[in-house]
Amino acid sequence: MKGTKNFIIQLDKAYNETFKTEGGLELYGNVDFTTERQSNRIAKVMGVPHLYKTDIKDGYEVLIDASPIYRQIYEGSKQWYQNVVNEKENLFYLSKDMIICYRENDKSEWVGFLDNCLVKPIMEEEKEIKTSLVLPETVTSKKFTGKISMTYANRDLKELGVENGQTLHMNPLGGVKYWFEGIEYWWVRTKDIFAIQLA
C-alpha cells in the first residue's frame, strides 16, 4: 500500500487497556480521561509516501503523534477517528510531521525524524519553600530552567555532535509532553535546542 503524500501506518490497537507509571506500576484507565497515557504510540509503517523521499521504509516502526486517534465526545456521541484508512485493519494515514521517531525493528535504537527528537527535562531545585506548616524535612520547589537530557536525537543534531544522553540547553518554555512506555518525555524540535552543555 502506498500513500500519496502521507504515511500509512498500522496500530495493533488504538488504545491500550492499561498504562504504566514511572515507577513501573501498571494501572487500568478510562481512555476518555487518560487518552494521552493509553494511546498506542508505536505503529508499523505499511506504506511510505509516493511523493516524498524518506529514510523510513515499509515495515519500520515509528513513534507517532497520537492526536489523530483521539476521539472527542460531542453531544454525548464519540467522534470517529479522523485519519482512518481501514477501520478493521487499524490502518491510519499520517503526515510526515506526525512521526516523531523511527527505527528499523525492535532491536534498533530510535532516531528522531526530520527535526523532531525526544528529551527528558532536568528539573532543578529553585529555593526553599517558606511555610507555617510543620513539615518533616525542608521542602524545595523544582523548576525547569532549560536543561535537558537528550534521549533520541535526530540526524541533523547528530551531525552537529549531539549524542543521546548528553545534557543540552533548550528553550525554557519547554516542549510537548509525550508519554511512552510509562515515562514522560518531551517532544521538541531542533530549533528549540540552543547549545550542548560543556563538561
Image (cartoon, rainbow, N blue to C red):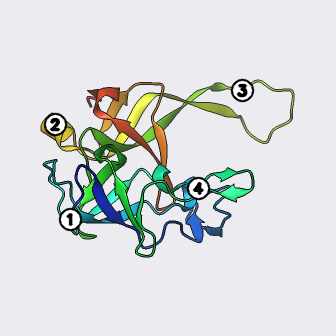
Please name the residue that numbered disc 4 is placed on. Answer: 71
Mark found first going from the N terminus, 3 or 2 = 3
In this rendering, which labeled residue sits more in front, label 1 or label 3?
1
Q: Amino acid at mark 2?
A: Gly
Asked which secondary structure carries label 4, the reply is loop
Label 2, label 4: how far apart the Cα atoms are: 40 Å
Q: Amino acid at mark 1?
A: Glu
Which residue occupies 70% across, 34% down? 139
Q: Which mark is residue 175?
A: none
Q: Residue 82, image x and y in percent?
A: 48, 54
**1 and 3 marks in contact (CB < 8 Å):** no
Mark found first going from the N terminus, 3 or 4 = 4
Q: Amino acid at mark 3?
A: Ile
Label 1, label 3: how far apart the Cα atoms are: 48 Å
Q: Which mark is residue 161?
A: 2
Q: Residue 18, image x and y in percent?
A: 59, 69
* Left or right relative to 110: residue 52: left
Which residue occupies 17% across, 62% down? 57
